[in-house]
Image (cartoon, rainbow, N blue to C red):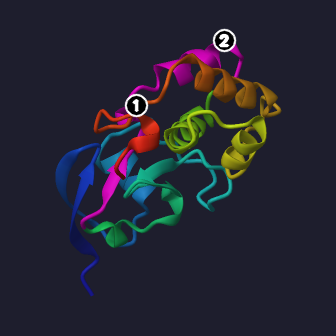
């Protein structure tokens, strides 16, 4: 059986046709083949969330996805998230990171949360980030950073519409 396949997908709004080993995980292809270094490889078991991306508008852990299953999919990494400056600034201001390894996955999850719920409660923030591990901060600073970002400016969807009206 031939292990190399052609996968056509959209990565950060750009059509990509790649010939890859069908056994590779999406996170491996994102980082090693497509050179998008913001997505991290952590546990490779779906536990840590460092590899979190948006696939067809849904939060997914890219270490649990075979690239062979991505034919025609839209993948968005942290490098392509619109209007995340408020989140980034809030993470800095509230010490929402220490080593930074989990930060890109947390930002992806937080941006998706704010896109769907521009004014989340702290409880909803905790629920949203519950699938992402951070071994450094104790989470409260991350929750406060996301909460502060939600108060800083409204999130705008990729299509330019307000977050709560975005077409996904």
Residue 6 position in % (x across, y down): 19, 68
Residue carrying label 1: 156
1 or 2: mark nearer the eye: 1
Residue 156 position in % (x across, y down): 40, 31
SS at mark 1 in the image: loop
Image point 61% across, 21% down: which residue? 151
1 or 2: tag closer to the N-terminus: 2
Within the magenta stretch, is there residue 75?
Answer: yes
Residue carrying label 2: 93
As drawn, 25 above or below 112: below
Residue 31 image label? none
- 67 sits left or right of 123 in the view: left
Q: Which residues are magenta?
A: 72-99
Image point 65% across, 29% down: which residue? 146
Image point 41% across, 36% down: which residue? 37
SS at mark 2 in the image: helix
Q: Residues within 10 Å of mark 2 (few under 14, many from 20)?
A: some
Residue 166 position in % (x across, y down): 38, 44
Within the magenta stretch, is there residue 147?
Answer: no
As drawn, 68 above or below 158: below
Q: Which residue is at the front of the view, 82 or 79?
A: 82
> Which residue is outermost to the front?
165
- 9 sits left or right of 117 in the view: left
Q: How far is disc 1 from disc 2 in space, using C-alphas?
A: 21 Å
Residue 20 position in % (x across, y down): 27, 64
- 145 sits left or right of 3 in the view: right
- From this viewpoint, is residue 99 visible? no
- From this viewpoint, is residue 15 visible? yes
């Amino acid at each position: 059986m031939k292990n190399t396949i052609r996968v056509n997908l959209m990565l950060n709004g750009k059509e990509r046709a790649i010939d890859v080993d069908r056994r590779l995980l999406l996170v491996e292809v994102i980082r090693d083949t497509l050179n998008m270094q913001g997505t991290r490889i952590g546990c490779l078991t779906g536990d840590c969330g460092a590899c979190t991306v948006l696939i067809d508008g849904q939060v997914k852990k890219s270490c649990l996805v075979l690239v062979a299953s991505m034919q025609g999919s839209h993948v968005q990494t942290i490098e392509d998230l619109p209007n995340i400056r408020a989140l980034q600034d809030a993470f800095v201001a509230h010490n929402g990171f220490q080593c930074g390894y989990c930060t890109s996955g947390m930002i992806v999850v937080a941006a998706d949360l704010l896109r769907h719920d521009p004014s989340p409660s702290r409880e909803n923030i905790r629920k949203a980030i519950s699938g992402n591990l951070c071994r450094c901060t104790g989470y409260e600073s991350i929750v406060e950073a996301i909460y502060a970002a939600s108060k800083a400016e409204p999130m705008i969807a990729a299509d330019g519409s307000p977050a709560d009206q975005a077409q996904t």
